[in-house]
Image (spheres, rainbow, N blue to C red):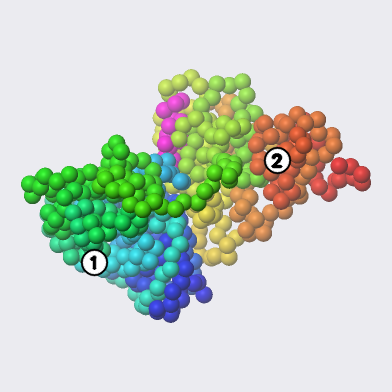
């Protein structure tokens, strides 16, 4: 049985933040879940998917976030508690239905988890999705700990049903990927089937209907404001003239800093967990009792701006600061030491020195930049394209996924990346704006997500570029989740269809379609060369299973390779491929047998035929 299905109320378990959110959803009676996977939210989805295999919960992976939200919206309006899980940039994709769904509302609870990523551990930007709450006039909830995340999810469903609106449940990476003790609650029976009562005047968003629904949304907003005022997740603690307003994980840093600076008797803390709408009266009362206030929030000054507006309305002249020189930055994550330092400087206190561990004699850890795995077929595909395009002036638009790591040397095969699917459409622009050969890269999951419309656009407008679809049979970077092209039979799961990328490409009107096996290097170079020399749009499908995925399915059968004594130490293998299985020993290239997967690409690249299968080692040869 899945551990998140443990039916022992009161039992305490150590959980990842994402596991706690999934458990909270189960305890809330979640019946329908959907997602497009994206770090730092991925483990919520993978846990709910696994739970769905052992319970009455229905959970599915959508082709993109827009699709995922729309299917959940239909389920919620059929009376089923529903959840959609996305990362912060994923909500951009789902923003179109989100804005109008706020007008339509929901009949059962709908919680949209949006996982923000300060410091961009796995993202292309640091956007603060609290602004989506303001834009859509929907409530936003923000947990401060792993345990609270479980509790707050249940509150989110109740709030959604009380307002009959979706609720945004905003986390950050530090909550998603922290571990904490969680106390289990009851798991109720799941309502598996609902019903949709037809009411076009409420659910068909034509202008005449939407004008009236906007009025309803603003009435709901007033109700949401009154609920925020009394929410248990908005509270004041402490006494004194110093005021600190904080949210999310920052609350923990603030609490520690107040203790360490020995200002607990002088400081009041307002923790905001139900952050949109802001509890206006609670904030104004807090401000009236303070001499000066510091707003501590990662990301954008969302609370700070609201707090200053409230102060102005009340005619309060106290000093209120948050972001600015010598204060907090809009960049990256906060940490306890930074928060402590800013609090001390702002309130002009010193406190007791914090004992720190002396690390002066500890050498710095070597940097380990992200890299394509040993045996990754993308490395072979990049090498193949690079060789096929030798002598050409090229532009390489790329996309979001493992293959984005192709930007690193020695491959250096990414020139322009914006967002999911952009490799295809930016190729259209580059092909018209320049005379260079445009060769773009996109993964299989990303192609289904948002690459198809761009390809159709390119065919219709008669653009000229080559699209390389890197089909590794899974959604790899976020943890091997399925996509429409995955063979679900390999996972022993039935009842799924399968969409052929090749058929999809041909159906889009592309006539020049080539399928290669990247581990057959010489043959593939010739095939790719023909494709990129052809006028118009050509598509190359590089088909080879993700090496880690193949290993997990026990389908990896390659023979390990080694460097023989024939090696002249020219290091072409390292300089051209950069596979992490290579290392230098006494100045000579060697292959780590633990990392080697037997893809044989390096053996095909070596001009001296010095890389051979381990089984070919002769007696006495080193």
Vertical arrangement, residue 40 with respect to residue 458, above or below: below
Q: Which mark is residue 582?
A: 2
| Magenta segment | 418-431
Q: From the viewer's side, name the closer residue of 602 and 348.
A: 348
Residue drawn at the location 66% of the way across and 40% of the way down: 579
Q: Nearer the viewer, residue 258 or 519?
A: 258
Residue 125 is left or right of residue 304, and the answer is right
Majority SS type along the magenta span: helix
- Contact between marks 2 and 1 (CB within 8 A): the answer is no
Does residue 199 appear to the left or right of 560 in the view shown? left
Which element carries disc 2, helix, strand or loop?
Answer: strand
> Which image quadrant: the C terminus?
top right
Q: Is residue 80 left or right of residue 390?
A: left
Residue 215, compared with residue 542, is above or below; it is: below
Q: Residue furthest left?
A: 315
Q: Residue at x 39, y 43 (%)?
A: 332
Snapshot quadrant of residue 254: bottom left
Task: Tell which of 213 and 607 is nearer to you.
Answer: 607
Earlier sequence position, callout 2 versus callout 1:
1
From the top left corner, tell me how far across and down residue 365 is, in percent. Answer: 58, 44
Give the x, y percent position of residue 448. 46, 47
Residue located beneath label 1 in the image: 232
> How crowded is the residue under tag 1: few (<14 C-alpha within 10 Å), some, or many (20+)?
few
Image coordinates for residue 557, horizontal then vertical, percent: 72, 53
C-alpha distance separating marks 2 and 1? 56 Å
Q: Position of residue 285 (x, y in %)?
A: 13, 57
Neighbour tally class for label 2: few under 14, some 14-19, many 20 plus, Cα within 10 Å: many
Residue at image point 43% right, 44% down: 120
Q: Residue at x 60, y 60 (%)?
A: 490
Q: Nearer the viewer, mark 2 or mark 1?
A: 1
Q: Can residue 60 be seen from the camera position used here?
A: no
């Amino acid at each position: 049985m899945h551990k998140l299905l443990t039916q022992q109320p009161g039992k305490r378990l150590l959980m990842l933040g994402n596991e706690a959110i999934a458990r909270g959803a189960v305890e809330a009676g979640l019946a329908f879940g959907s997602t497009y996977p994206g770090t730092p939210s991925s483990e919520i989805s993978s846990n709910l998917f696994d739970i769905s295999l052992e319970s009455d919960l229905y959970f599915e992976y959508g082709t993109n976030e827009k699709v995922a939200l729309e299917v959940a919206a239909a389920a919620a309006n059929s009376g089923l508690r529903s959840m959609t899980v996305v990362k912060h940039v994923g909500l951009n994709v789902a923003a179109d239905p989100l804005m109008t769904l706020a007008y339509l509302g929901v009949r059962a609870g709908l919680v949209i988890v949006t996982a923000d990523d300060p410091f961009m551990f796995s993202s292309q930007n640091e956007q603060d999705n609290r602004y989506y709450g303001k834009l859509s006039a929907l409530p936003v909830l923000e947990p401060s700990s792993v345990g609270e995340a479980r509790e707050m999810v249940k509150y989110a469903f109740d709030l959604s049903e009380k307002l009959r609106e979706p609720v945004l449940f905003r986390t950050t990476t530090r909550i998603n990927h922290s571990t904490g003790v969680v106390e289990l609650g009851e798991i109720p029976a799941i309502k598996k089937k609902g019903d949709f009562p037809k009411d076009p005047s409420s659910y068909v968003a034509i202008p005449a209907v939407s004008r009236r629904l906007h009025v309803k949304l603003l009435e709901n907003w007033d109700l949401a404001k009154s609920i925020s005022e009394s929410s248990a997740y908005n509270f004041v603690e402490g006494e004194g003239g110093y005021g600190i307003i904080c949210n999310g994980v920052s609350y923990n840093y603030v609490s520690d800093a107040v203790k360490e600076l020995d200002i607990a008797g002088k400081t009041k803390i307002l923790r905001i967990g139900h952050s949109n709408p802001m509890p206006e009266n609670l904030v104004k009362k807090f401000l009236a009792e303070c001499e000066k206030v510091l707003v501590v929030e990662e990301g954008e000054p969302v609370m700070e701006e609201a707090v200053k507006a409230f102060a102005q309305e009340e005619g309060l002249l106290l000093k209120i600061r948050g972001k600015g020189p010598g204060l907090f930055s809009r960049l990256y994550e906060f940490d306890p030491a930074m928060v402590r330092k800013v609090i001390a400087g702002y309130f002009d206190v010193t406190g007791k020195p914090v004992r720190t561990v002396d690390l002066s004699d500890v050498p710095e850890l070597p940097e380990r930049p992200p890299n394509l795995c040993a045996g990754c077929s993308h490395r072979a595909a990049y090498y193949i394209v690079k060789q096929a395009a030798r002598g050409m002036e090229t532009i390489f638009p790329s996309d979001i996924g493992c293959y984005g790591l192709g930007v690193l040397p020695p491959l250096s095969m990414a020139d322009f990346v914006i967002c999911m699917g952009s490799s295809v459409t930016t190729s259209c622009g580059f092909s018209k704006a320049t005379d260079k050969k445009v060769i773009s890269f996109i993964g299989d999951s990303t192609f289904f997500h948002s690459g198809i419309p761009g390809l159709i656009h390119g065919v219709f407008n008669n653009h000229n570029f080559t699209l390389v679809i890197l089909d590794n049979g899974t959604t790899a970077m976020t943890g091997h989740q399925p996509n429409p092209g995955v063979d679900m039979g390999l996972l022993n799961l039935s009842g799924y269809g399968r969409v052929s990328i090749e058929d999809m490409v041909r159906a889009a009107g592309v006539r020049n379609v080539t399928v290669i096996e990247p581990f057959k290097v010489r043959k593939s170079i010739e095939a790719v060369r023909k494709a990129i020399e052809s006028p118009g749009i050509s598509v190359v499908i590089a088909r080879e299973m993700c090496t880690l995925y193949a290993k997990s399915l026990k389908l990896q059968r390659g023979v390990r390779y080694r460097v023989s004594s024939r090696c002249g130490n020219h290091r072409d293998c390292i300089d051209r491929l950069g596979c992490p299985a290579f290392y230098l020993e006494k100045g000579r290239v060697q292959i780590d047998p633990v990392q080697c997967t037997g893809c044989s690409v390096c053996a095909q690249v070596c001009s001296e035929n010095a890389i051979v299968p381990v089984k070919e080692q002769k007696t006495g040869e080193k």
